Amino acid sequence: MLADVDVISKFAQLEFQLGDTERAKALFESTLSSYPKRTDLWSVYIDMMVKHGSQQEVRDIFERVIHLSLAAKKIKFFFKRYLKYEKKHGSTESVQAMKEKALQYVESQSSLAAT
């Protein structure tokens, strides 16, 4: 079944490249709803949306992925990507807001570890 997921991902990437953004998004969304912990798929989806989607759509995907129940290491990876994205495409305010979200995440993880 995992091979099927990889094929769907490749097909969705091809749809993006051929200009059918809505079909590509639908394929990724459907696959991610079945496999929400596949960070490789989230990463590819983000890459494709950075190239072919709006800034708001990219931010919405980042917001979804940083709130998933994943290992802290994986969430931190997406926080770093999100911050890098904001530094390139956002404002001083959006960068600061992103840093605050990351700090809140770290603090919440610290309080969970302390209990």
Image: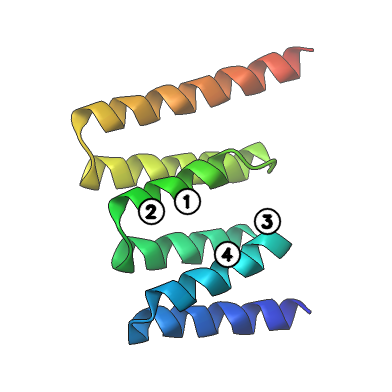
Question: In the displayed structure, would residue 3 be above or below residue 84?
Answer: below
State which quarter of the image contains the C terminus.
Answer: top right
Cα–Cα gap, marks 3 and 2: 18 Å
The label shown at residue 61 is 1
Specify the quadrant of the image occupied by residue 97.
top left
Q: Amino acid at mark 1?
A: Ile
Q: Earlier in the sequence, mark 3 or mark 4?
A: 4
- Residue 51: image x %, image y %? 30, 67
The label shown at residue 29 is 4
Q: Residues within 10 Å of mark 4 (few under 14, many from 20)?
A: some
Q: Amino acid at mark 4?
A: Glu
Q: Are marks 3 and 2 in contact (CB under 8 Å)?
A: no
Say if residue 81 shows up in the picture.
no
Point out the frontmost of discs 3 and 2.
Answer: 2
Query: Pointer 2: what residue?
Result: 57
Q: Secondary structure at mark 3?
A: loop
Q: Secondary structure at mark 1?
A: helix
Cα–Cα gap, marks 2 and 1: 6 Å
Q: Are marks 2 and 1 in contact (CB under 8 Å)?
A: yes
